Image (cartoon, helix red, strand yellow):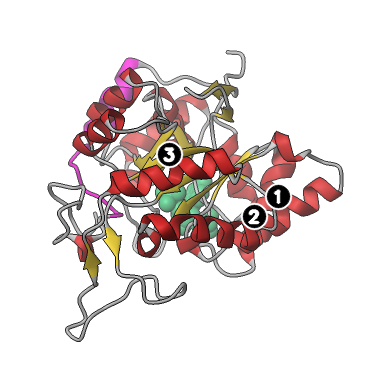
Amino acid sequence: MTSDLKYLRHNDGTQVQNIGLGTFASVEGDCEKAVLHAIDVGYRHIDTAYFYGNEGEVGAAVRKKIDEGVIKREDIFITTKLWCNFHEPERVEYACRKTLANIGLDYVDLYLIHWPFSYAYRGDNEMIPTDANGEVELVDIDYVDTWRAMEKLVELGLTKSIGVSNFNADQLTRLLANCKIKPIHNQIEVHPGLNQKNLIELCKKNDIVVTGFSPLGRHNAEKRTPAFMYDGKVQAIGDKYNKSIAQVLIRYLIELGTVPLPKSSNPKRIEENFNVFDFKLDARDHAILDSYHGGERVAHARQAIKSKYYPFQHYSACF
Ligand code: A2P
């Protein structure tokens, strides 16, 4: 089969590569190296967030590759995210400018509302403010109001596009009914344990691209989780195509109609995860992978469950 590595067109005319490098939980110092290597391998789509604390490393790597002449600014798509303590509409532009200062560029390609719920603002670095009982301090800010401030960022040229992350079907539908600028992405957790077929369908109908984080179910080699990373049936699928389990899982996300964002700081795995555009899963493979769908989440944000904007009906601690 010919490679189906390509660019997808968004509802606002911008484009993105149909795979991206995830950077959540990369160890300090590793992220910059990972992004430098990813660009050499061919990734042109990098996902970061204020919350991850690595916007600076992502920016340093991208600027280095621009200075070296390997890429031009317009060749690379950088996504980052507004954290929950900056949801007050008058704080959104401040947060975005802070992010741009971290990254060291004058615009990002995409700025997402990281979660639909909001936390109290107790300073830029207090990202999960807690009360005397140790409970997170939630505040009642409507994400539609935050969105209006996000729309202004596009007018100001601070970001080319805007979108959301971890929004459920009702929240997305309500946002679509109340926006001037449509979100271009909903970034959500997707893997065989949580295949998100209904939400993907809704996004597709509304011309919103789904980016899938944790395609490997946040693989943990020490704990040997999630189960589908260690299952002979998935290994057998990989063997048929001469691919690893990770490659099968990343391919599964592509064929579900999403843009996978596998996170890795390891050069070999960064290459492996990109090498998924020369094979196709068949219906039986899909049936096996679909059979793991139990609805378990790795990113459940349980601390915010009391917010009326908490997006999930149920969650589980892990696999
Ligand atoms: P590392 O960064 O050392 O490669 P997810 O994207 O589902 O959140 O999973 C991320 C986890 O999976 C990280 O611990 C990452 O470790 C690991 N990982 C990334 N790519 C692979 C791969 N190809 N095979 C096995 N583990 C991987």
Residue occupying the far right of the picture: 68
Residue occupying the far bottom of the picture: 132
Q: Give the residue at x 21% y 59%.
A: 140
Q: What amino acid type should be assigned to the residue bearing mark 1?
A: His
- Residue with the mark numbered 1: 37
Mark nearer the viewer, 2 or 3: 3
Examine the structure image and report whether residue 136 is included in the region drawn in magenta: no
**Mark 2 → mark 3, Cα distance in angstroms:** 25 Å
Q: Are marks 1 and 2 in contact (CB under 8 Å)?
A: yes
Q: Give the residue at x 27% y 24%.
A: 202
| Depth order, front residue of 167/180 | 180
- Residue with the mark numbered 2: 34
117 in relation to 12, above or below:
below
Res. 109 visible in picture: no
- Disc 3 secondary structure class: strand
Q: Is the distance from the Cβ of mark 2 to the nearest ligand 1 atom less than 8 Å? A: yes
Neighbour class for label 3 at 10 Å: few (<14), some, many (≥20)?
many
Q: Give the residue at x 56% y 22%.
A: 13
Figure quadrant of the N terminus = top right
Residue span colored magenta: 283-299
Q: Are marks 3 and 1 in contact (CB under 8 Å)?
A: no
**Mark 3 → mark 1, Cα distance in angstroms:** 27 Å
213 in relation to 275, above or below:
below
Mark nearer the viewer, 3 or 1: 3
Residue occupying the far top of the picture: 1
Q: Which mark is residue 163?
A: 3
| Depth order, front residue of 121/272 | 121
**Mark 1 → mark 2, Cα distance in angstroms:** 5 Å
